[in-house]
Image (cartoon, helix red, strand yellow):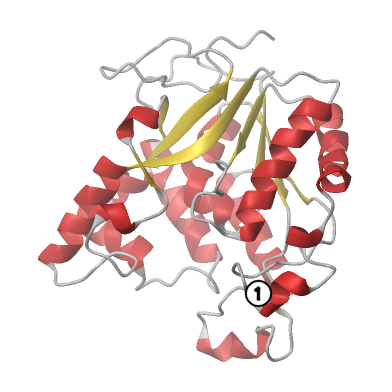
Amino acid sequence: MGEVMKSTYAGYRILLVHAHPDDETINNGATMALYSTLGAQVTLVTCTRGEEGEVLVPELSYLASSEQDGLGQHREIELANAMKVLGITDFRFLSHYRDSGMMGTEPNNRPDVFWQVDLDVAAKQLVEVIEEIKPHILITYDEIGGYGHPDHIKAHQVAMRASELSQWQIQKIYWNTMPKSVLAEGIAKMKEIGSDFFGTDNVDDLPFAKDDSLVTTLIDGTAFVDAKMNAMKAHATQIALDGPFFALSNNLGQQVWGHEYYTLVKGVKGEPFDSLGRESDLTAGIIL
């Protein structure tokens, strides 16, 4: 397990705040499985049920919001299956907020979508979770939600606001990060087989690609790649087996998904560090 030094993480508590089912597995699946297996308490809060997602399974197309509008309930099942694979037992929804869809689309105007909820109302709901589980570590998105989806942006805002409002002081806060160097390697490999990655052959066109200098922390979860990949498969309506995620695995090797990157925005980096000065353990420096 790379540089992770402790033999047990019993007593440590980690809270992840995500926008839709599947976001947690793509961004943090290996991290979640690693720390849970080693004894940490890992809690996932998902802010919507992803009702506006594209249905990638043809025989389930009737679930789409434009048809029977049953995708949210189905994605609840997919999330539960993914969490079983990752070994996570504490996963919950923030409330009954609906997926807001992409920025500027018609769903943004619905009064029940997450994008429209008052920030402090949603943040106070998350405060209840924080004060219940008392996490040492919070993981969420950066200020643009990684790539600009309104639910990702709102999840970031709610998580950060809740951390301010809560009487419980979270010691370390991380934002998910994907370094340009890793994505550039992926794009190069995809070019070799005559394909692109998310419709581009230039890493600078990817809004979620971040300068490597922003990476403060690298978690080596390669021992849990199989679990992460199987959890991704559990999100079948959202992640196609022949899509860019699995294509990247086929060309770079599954280990590409075993390294998960973070930017520490609250707290102080702690040892052990890798050769680039990056943390290799989220719990480094945490006082129990």
Please state which amino acid type lies under the numbered disc 1.
Answer: Glu
Question: Can see residue 66?
Answer: yes
Q: Which residue carries the number 1 mark?
A: 52
Q: Which sits in the foreground, 126 or 165?
A: 165
Asked whether, in this view, residue 275 is left or right of residue 188, the answer is right
Image location (x, y in percent) of residue 3: 37, 19
Mark 1 surroundings: few (<14), some (14-19) or many (≥20) residues within 10 A: many
Q: Which sits in the foreground, 8 or 236?
A: 236
Quadrant of res 172: top right
Quarter holding the N terminus is top left
Q: Residue at x 52, y 89 (%)?
A: 58
Q: Residue at x 70, y 34 (%)?
A: 160
Image location (x, y in percent) of residue 162: 78, 34
Q: Is residue 177 above or below residue 80?
A: above
Q: Residue at x 69, y 18 (%)?
A: 11
Question: Can see residue 20?
Answer: no
Q: Is residue 30 above or below residue 245?
A: above
Quadrant of res 164: top right
Q: Residue at x 37, y 61 (%)?
A: 245
Image location (x, y in percent) of residue 235: 55, 65
